Amino acid sequence: MPRILVAECKQEVSSFNPVRSGYDDFVVRRGTEFFDYHRAARAEVGGALEALAEQRRYETVPTYSAKAITSGGTLADASFARIADEFLSSLHEANSPSGAYFALHGAMAAESEGDPEGFLLEESRRILGEEIPILVSLDLHAVLTDRMLRHSDAIVAFHTYPHVDFYETGARAARILMRILGGEARPVTARVKIPMLVRGDELITDSGSFGQVIGEAKAFERDSRGLSAGVTIGNPFTDVPALRSNSLAVANGDLECAVRCATRLAGQMWERREGMQASLTAVAEAVGLAGRTRGTAVLMDAADATSSGASGDGNAILREVWKSGFEGSVLAPIVDPPAVSSAFVAGIGGSIRTRVGGALDPARFRPLEIEARVKMLSDGSFRSETFGSEWHAGPTAVLESGRRVLVVTSRPVSLYDRALFLAHGHDPKRFDLVVVKSPHCESPMYRDWCGRLINVDGPGATSANVRTLGHRKCARPVFPLDSPPEFVPEVTVYQRDRYA
Ligand SMILES: [Zn+2]
């Protein structure tokens, strides 16, 4: 039976978060533990395993998985070296494979390696040889690099934002791999670099104009000549030389067809660039608006979005709440290890005077002095509302200061759903102002019932106001950091020799 190696390495970073992430920020799984996890989770590897199992012709071989617990700052070099070594050693140990599938993210960055996934692919190719097809799946926010394209046979990227097609993307990659192994597919890839960074609601594929572009990519995949197509928009916070958007089309042997598709997708993105920017409200105005809202005002603090790699200790909205004397009830999350420690020392029911905010990113956030009662202490472990997986915020304290409730964690967790609040006894529906540290929130969780949803223009390592971040490494000019350069789509073609 042909043997298919399966490996995974996923993390998304913000280069603007001053806190380095490390090996301990990953969950590492090997062998059967790796597959057992994915048979229960509906992510890329699970989708690939199911698609491969359908044909009953392949043996799947679990190798290595390093999956970040949540997004974070740039990965420390030593930690990336350890992960790369473990990833690559596991490939060495695999016995004569026929093909490989890698679930990667594409928006990692280590201190001195701006393209960790490209590095893993180049080294994997060295180990596995030129003849073995390697299929790769990437996040929609991947920073697509030349090195990733040169050392893989085909790339498949998510089609949805917010991402809901993890499982389907893995299955798409596995099906292409099986077609290659069956001698039915000879992938040729066309790629166009699009000098733009995008953000905002038009990216929501269900409702925004990005969905129309992705619709074209899906139509290409349904065509008998198309294997894979999409647009990777890059994570605007991963400041590396290759940061930009890219269109990608992989055709079955038909170069012209791939070139046409990639060119068309790039043109459509460029036409929409002005619309694909976030529309934001200043912090003071947002808190003022919340005071005039019937029902709950949800203040989306995308600038401090932990799921995008920010530190989560941003207190700009809280500072305004205190300063303005906002009278309504407030619910907000914040990462602050020293504040949590004070709460644990005081114990439940104790009163503390503490500082919140700026514990991790002091250059952006000045600590805010508050007096509060400790209402709850926990170990910070709970299940995500969206995926059911276990999340770990570390020791966590619920602090109450008048009508203001802060859920203070020791480490960042994703905050795009309500899980942290609900797990700590607070339903956002019962508050006048709720801070959501995410660039988006799922409709049933906030959007459908809130009185008003406000995208706040606060400071932070993941600000949608990308001009404020201070990019130093990404190739320029790029929209909107620079005024729009003339854009003439240039296609680069990638095809491995064995298909030529
Ligand atoms: Zn993403």
Image: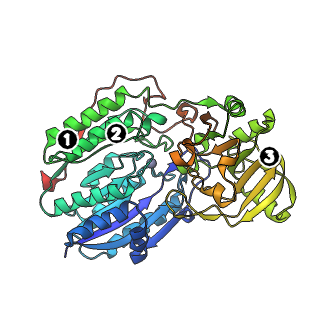
**Residue behind mark 1:** 258
Q: CA distance from mark 1 to mark 2?
A: 14 Å
Image vertical order of residue 47 relative to residue 112, above or below: below
Residue 235 position within the rendered picture, expressed as x and y whole percent measured from the top left: 46, 43
Secondary structure of the residue carrying tag 1 is helix
The quadrant the N terminus occupies is bottom left
Please state which amino acid type lies under the numbered disc 2: Asn
**Residue behind mark 3:** 403
Secondary structure of the residue carrying tag 3 is loop
Please state which amino acid type lies under the numbered disc 1: Ala
State if disc 3 and disc 1 touch (CB < 8 Å): no
Residue 392 visible in the shown view: yes
Residue 268 position within the rendered picture, expressed as x and y whole percent measured from the top left: 31, 30
**Residue behind mark 2:** 246
Neighbourhood count class around disc 3 (C-alpha, 10 Å): few under 14, some 14–19, many 20 upward? few
Image vertical order of residue 182 relative to residue 281, above or below: below
Image vertical order of residue 390 relative to residue 402, above or below: below
Residue 442 visible in the shown view: no
Instruction: Please report whichever mark, 3 or 2, sits nearer to the chain's N-terminal start.
Output: 2
Neighbourhood count class around disc 2 (C-alpha, 10 Å): few under 14, some 14–19, many 20 upward? many
State if disc 2 and disc 1 touch (CB < 8 Å): no
Instruction: Please report whichever mark, 1 or 3, sits nearer to the chain's N-terminal start.
Output: 1
Q: CA distance from mark 1 to mark 3?
A: 58 Å
Where residue 366 is drawn, which disc sits there?
none
Instruction: Please report whichever mark, 1 or 2, sits nearer to the chain's N-terminal start.
Output: 2
